[in-house]
Image (cartoon, rainbow, N blue to C red):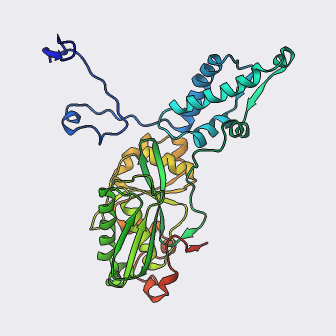
Amino acid sequence: NNTFQDHYLDVEYDLSKVMFIATANVLHTIPAALQDRLEIIRLSGYTEQEKNEIAKRYLVPKQLEANGLTAEKVEFVSEAIATLIQSYTREAGVRNLEREISSLCRKVARKYVVLSDDEKEKFREVLVSELVKELLGPIRFRTQLANEHNEIGVATGLAWTEVGGDVLQIESSLMPGRGQLTLTGKLGEVMQESMRTAISCVRARANKLGISPTFYKRYDMHIHVPEGAIPKDGPSAGITIATAVVSLLTNNPVRRDVAMTGEITLRGKVLPIGGVKEKLLAAHRAGIKTIILPRDNEKDLIEVPKEVLSTFQVNLVDRVDEVLNIALDEPGAKEISGDMSPIWDQDVSNITGSNTTLD
C-alpha cells in the first residue's frame, strides 16, 4: 500500500515494499481475513537436548557475567539444567529457562558477596539438581509419566499445547442409568464432538467387539480428562477415547506402555493429526514405549530426533480395529473378534475406569 496514512501523525507512508514479519503462539486467535493474507511458517519448539545446549553455551555464560560471577567460581552441571527444564519451566522456547538461571546466579552471588576475601578466593559452587531445588524451592511442574499398571477404561493419549507436547489420560466410568453421557475436563466443542463420534463408532461396531448393542439403554457413561482447570480441545483424542470406551465395556485393560493420537470417523477410519514431533517428545519424557499414529502421519516422523524415535515402536494404523488390537491387553494373542467377556455380565457397580487396576 503506497498511500497508507497514519491517523496519529497524519502522515502518509509508502508501505508497498515493506515485508511484515509477525509471530504468534497459536493460529486460532488470528482473524481469518488477516490469516488469509499471511504465509504461515511453522516453527516447532526446542527439544530438551537443544534447550540444554543453548543454556550451557549461551544462557549460563550470559547470566554469570551479568551477575558478576565467573565459570571458575560457579558451575552448572547438565543435571541441574535438566532439572530447570523439566521441573521449573514449561515452554516451547527458553525465556523462562533464562529467568530461572538468572535467579540461581543472583542467589549464588548473594552468598558470594558476604564472604571474606580469603573465603572468596576459595569459593566454588557446583550447581547440581538437589542444590537447584534448595535454592528455587518446590518444583513447579511434574512430568506426566506412564501408568504404573494396565487399567480398565483408562487410555493414554498425546496432546499438543502452546508450550509443547503433553501426555493426557482419558478416563471412562460406567454406572446403572438410562444412557446419559457426561463429558468433563473443561473440554472444547471440537473435543466433545470427537468423544460423541468415538462412542457412536463403538456402538456401530458393538457386535464385532462383543458388546451388547443396547448397553447405552441401561447404563450411564462418564468420560473425563484430568486436570479439569486446563482447557482442552481438538479432534486428535478420537482413537484414545474409543480405546478407553471399548476397554470399559469389554472389561479388557489398556496396555500401560501404549500412547496414541488420531482422529476417528463414524466408520472407524483413523485420520491424520498435527503436532507429531511435540507429541512424541512428550511420550519420550513419560517413558512410553509403543506409539500409535495415523498412517498418513508417517511423513511427519522425519521431524522427530533420531535418538528419540529409536526408543519407540511406532505403529501406523488406518482403522480403529488396528488400534484396539495393539492397545488392549488381551487381543495380543487373539484379534478383536467378538469373543471378549462383556461388562454387563458382571457387577457394574465395581467397574470404573479410574479405580480398577490390573497388573
Taking depth in this image into account, of 292 and 92 the one nearest to the observer is 92
Residue 308 relative to residue 236: left or right: right
Instruction: Name the residue located 61 percent from the left edge and 72 percent from the top edge.
Output: 359
Residue extending furthest right?
A: 118
- Residue 199's x, y, as percent? 33, 71
Instruction: Name the residue located 43 percent from the left edge and 65 percent from the top edge.
Output: 224
Is residue 354 in sight in this rendering? yes
Instruction: Name the residue located 36 percent from the left edge and 61 percent from the top edge.
Output: 238
Residue 53 relative to residue 213: left or right: right
Residue 357 relative to residue 104: left or right: left
- Residue 241's x, y, as percent? 40, 65
- Residue 226's x, y, as percent? 48, 60
- Residue 230's x, y, as percent? 44, 52
Instruction: Name the residue located 17 percent from the left edge and 12 percent from the top edge.
Output: 10
> Which image quarter: residue 18?
top left
> Which image quarter: residue 335?
bottom left
Compared with residue 321, is residue 225 higher up or lower down, i.e. above or below? Answer: above
Quarter of the picture containing the N terminus is top left
Is residue 324 in sight in this rendering? no
Compared with residue 309, is residue 24 higher up or lower down, i.e. above or below? Answer: above
Taking depth in this image into account, of 310 and 213 the one nearest to the observer is 213
> Which image quarter: residue 72?
top right
Residue extending furthest front?
A: 8
Residue extending furthest bottom?
A: 345
Taking depth in this image into account, of 117 and 291 the one nearest to the observer is 117
